[in-house]
Amino acid sequence: AQRLMDVDFAVSFTGNAGPSAMEGKPAGLVYCAVAKRDGTVFDFRFQWDGLARNEIRARVVADMVANTLTIMKEESEWQKRQQLRPQK
């Protein structure tokens, strides 16, 4: 998705929000990833038990927004540090 859309970051989601097990995967099991333009991929696994389908979906989106913002902030800080380094 990152390469196809030609964006700096892409976020993906897959899993089973429920209400029951599907394809051998328990309800509440969700995998997500953030891909950066440089090819770096950060992956995340979530397992929420006892929550309704829409609660699981809302939580995974909220957590991935927070994770993506953290990754973007770290990238921005790294770029600033690189700009401050003395040129040889």
Image (spheres, rainbow, N blue to C red):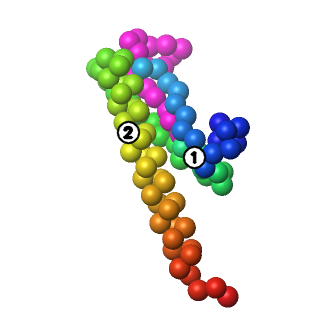
Q: Secondary structure at mark 1?
A: strand
Q: Secondary structure at mark 2?
A: helix
Name which residue lies at 67% across and 39% down: 5
Identified by mark 1, the residue type is Phe
Task: Please state if 88 lies on the left or on the right of 34 as rendered.
Answer: right
Name which residue lies at 39% across and 25% down: 57
Image position of 82 with respect to 38: above or below: below
The quadrant of the picture occupied by the N terminus is top right
Task: Please state if 8 lies on the left or on the right of 32 as rendered.
Answer: right
Is 22 a magenta residue?
Answer: yes
The quadrant of the picture occupied by the C terminus is bottom right
Image position of 21 with respect to 15: above or below: above
What whole-number distance in Å separates the C-alpha atoms at marks 2 and 1? 16 Å
| Circle 2 residues within 10 Å: few <14, some 14–19, many ≥20 | few
Image position of 26 with respect to 8: above or below: above
Q: Which is nearer the eye, 42 or 3?
A: 3
- Look at mark 2 in the image and give the residue it sits on: 63
Identified by mark 2, the residue type is Asp
- Look at mark 1 in the image and give the residue it sits on: 9
User: In front: mark 2 or mark 1?
Assistant: 1
* Most frequent secondary structure within the magenta stretch: loop
Name which residue lies at 52% across and 30% down: 13
Q: Position of residue 27 (x, y in %)?
A: 40, 18
Is 76 a magenta residue?
Answer: no
Name which residue lies at 57% across and 46% down: 9
Q: Which tag, 2 or 1, sits closer to the chain's start?
A: 1
Instruction: Please give the range of residues in magenta.
Output: 18-33
Q: Position of residue 37 (x, y in %)?
A: 64, 51
